[in-house]
Image (cartoon, rainbow, N blue to C red):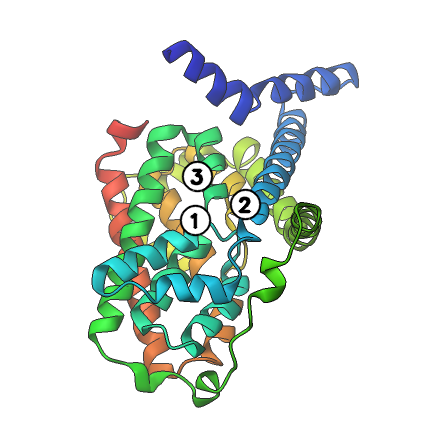
Amino acid sequence: MAALWGFFQNQVLGMKWLNGLAGSLLTAAGFDISGRLGGSLQFFIYDTVKIFFLLSVLIFGISYIQSYFPPERSRRILGRFRGLGANTVGALLGTVTPFCSCSSIPLFIGFTSAGLSLGVTFSFLISSPMVDLGSLVLLMSIFGAKVALAYVGLGLVVAIVGGSLIERLHMEGEIEEFIRKIRAVPEAEAAAMTRGDRVRFAKEQVRCTVRKVAPYIFIGVGIGAVIHNVIPGEWIEKILGGDNPYAVPMAAAVGAPMYADIFGTIPIAEGLLAKGAGLGTVLAFMMAVTTLSLPSLVMLRKAVKPKLLAVFIGLVMAGIILVGYFFNGFQHLFL
């Protein structure tokens, strides 16, 4: 069983055969893959093809399922729950929505305008870009099942606790007035979709998503290739290694203003980890980039007032930093 799982993780999810193929092709073309240029090219080709392939398969499957759950239906399901259970369901719903932080905000606005509790909508807003199913599969392909499951589990905890705390602060008055006047979208059109319609919808989601994230994947893989093969490992280890007590908040602070989704940040994380950065530091960077990007915060500011926006940023940043310290403290259990 262990051998079967190892094959699945390394050859199916990790696509290690592709790395060997890329190396063979580069060697045949005259590149030395043990050198900086050849090694960087091998990393770039391997990670780019792997991420685009996994991304397309995952988005198609998730979007097909999502076609059965339009916003109106999701709002109705969420409306049945109360308290911590509602926050948990909101966070879990976020895991099946393959959106970056900016794409999640229109759904957040729709949920809020439909009268769902503020805590539930924020639990969704935190979990959607941070811990979607695509991130689980990609993290498993690179860091292994233990890291992937722990990342998703702790990300859900951050989303649930963050939403619950916002709920307890009773900040409903911090929502912009126009949000309450938006009319809900009927679900009749989604309910009438045929199987062919759903397949076409899923294909369109793949096309739109890949087109939108492609620049960030290329940039992310390019940065990862440079980190992996050019930047000396001792530099990374000194700045972001586990011995630096400030590495986690530094990584979170650097990552927060950036705009990318998890597909673009994983290659950077892979390169940092290979050069000696702490596991928690790397994962804190990923969480900050995917959840607190500057463009998403600008969009969120249009829906909420500054006080609520500041509370949201503070709670999420605190949760990310705690998760980072947890992973750094127990890194030996995961790697």
Can residue 212 be seen? yes
What mark, if any, has residue 62 been given in the picture? 2
Quarter of the image that includes the N terminus: top left
Disc 3 secondary structure class: helix
Residue 118: where, in percent of width, then height?
A: 32, 73
Q: Earlier in the sequence, mark 2 or mark 1?
A: 2
Give whichever of 208, 81 is nearer the camera: 81
Q: Are marks 2 and 1 in contact (CB under 8 Å)?
A: no
Disc 1 secondary structure class: helix
The residue carrying mark 1 is 286
Q: Earlier in the sequence, mark 1 or mark 3?
A: 3
Residue 97: where, in percent of width, then height?
A: 49, 53
Residue 34: where, in percent of width, then height?
A: 61, 19
Whole-Å distance between the Cαs marked 2 and 3? 13 Å
Give whichever of 58, 28 is nearer the camera: 58
Is residue 96 toward the left or the right of residue 222 in the image? left
The residue carrying mark 3 is 136
